[in-house]
Image: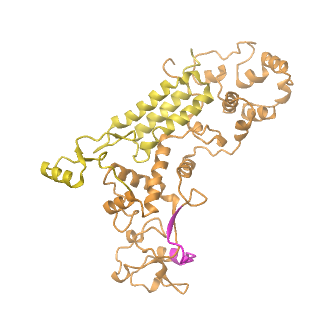
Chain colours: A yellow, B orange
Amino acid sequence: MKVSLEKSRIYASKGVSRSTKESLEQLTQIKFTDRLDKCLGFKMKYGRTTKEDFLDIYDRVASKLASWKGRLLNKPGRVTLAKVVLTSLPSYSMQIQWFPQYACDTLDKGVRNFIWPRLYFR
Amino acid sequence: MNDHAMHIVRWNKIIQPRNKGGLGIRTARLQNTALLGKLVWSLLQSKNKLWVSLLEDKYLKEGKLFLDKKAVGSSTWKAITKTLSILEDGFQFKIGDGETNIWFQPWILKQPLCDLIQDISPTDICLKIKDLWNHERCIIESLHTTFPSTITQAIQNLNLCIIPSIEDTWIWNGNLNGEYSTRSGYHWLLSRHEVEISQDTWSWIWKLPVAASVQFFIWQTCHRSIPVKAVLAHKGVNVSSDCPFCHNEDETILHCLFHCSRSVAVWQGCGFPNPNSLCIGVDVDNIDRVIHKM
């Protein structure tokens, strides 16, 4: 396995002193960073996961649906789209995180509302 | 009713597989758990993954995954322990060469034996499963440690067959080949959540040689959930349930599709026989059979 030192970053918790950081930087040739960014589209996170992290996932799903002009599709088309987009988009983060119940409920609700749009009462 | 659309088929029905009357949509909770199951499976299985050895060194002593259910650690580790507690009934310990220590794995009961027995004699601490048998005779009663009778019985009843060429291993019950996959994990979880056990009487819809939207309509009809006025009124929408064409009867599903003079005319215009001859004595409960017949 090869690690690209240039692309790697170290994130230190609060208590680590500056001199330790510097010596570690020299030793490993990897730079320190103060915030972890996205890696492969997945947010790297240090510490407690918050509600915002999961809402972020939901927002991405919602924006995907809006851009797909789902309203132009018929119902089976929307079902297929919901299956593909809504259940595959979050699956990357679902592989390593336990989604809290509200996050699951929000996602399911998104699927439901997408399948049954407001057509009957227009 | 303005900012809410009507969800005319219940969510619990939709999430069933397509051959059981649903649309095969996966729910987030079960999908999440099934995906995390892959991590649990890797932890139980392979020793040569880098992240597995990292987590083992950090959180597990002697590979006792089932002992450490305390959720302390990173969010991923917490997710793994939580998933394990949900999936553990689906995993089964398969004895091969019997080289596993008897105390730390739940190989005979759902719990590891060291959880159940307080006084383990120091001479027995290194016992392996294969050591419990001497020439096909169970020697558990001659050990220094006293086992509760339930455990002794369970072990004596075990039809053990040591296969020296295969290592002791975990197998996943949800899949025929014993390997965990997200798909089998999901279906295993879903079968435990099944609200109503329905038979495979739905595949025929999806095999009909008609457009997908027609299949969908038939699916909805078989759930008695097309938005005819009687159904809408039943669901609390403020409409009169009169048929808008003949004004004689309520617009039920049967009336709308078959009985109304207008629908009969449509059927016959398309070259079908009068649908009323097909559905004598039919009520809304076996409407799927009528459609099937056509």
Task: Name the image quarter holding residue A35.
Answer: top left
Residue B160: give x, y in percent of width and height: 56, 76
**The C terminus of chain B lies in quadrant:** top right
Task: Name the image quarter holding residue B280.
Answer: top right
Report the number of discs: 0
| Closer-to-camera residue (B270/A57) | A57
Residue A36: give x, y in percent of width and height: 29, 41
Look at the image and say whether residue B163 sits in the magenta stretch.
Answer: yes
Is residue A78 left or right of B68 when viewed as pictured? right
Question: Which residue is rendered at x = 50% and y = 59% of the image?
Answer: B89
Residue B5: give x, y in percent of width and height: 53, 23
Residue B238: give x, y in percent of width and height: 58, 16
**In the image, is residue B160 above or below residue A104?**
below
Is residue B174 left or right of B36 when viewed as pictured? right
Is residue A11 left or right of B294 when viewed as pictured? left
> Which range is magenta?
B153-171
Look at the image and say whether residue B270 sits in the magenta stretch.
Answer: no
Question: Which residue is rendered at x = 74% and y = 30% of the image?
Answer: B210
Question: Which residue is rendered at x = 54% and y = 33% of the image?
Answer: A82
Question: Which residue is rendered at x = 54% and y = 36% of the image?
Answer: A84
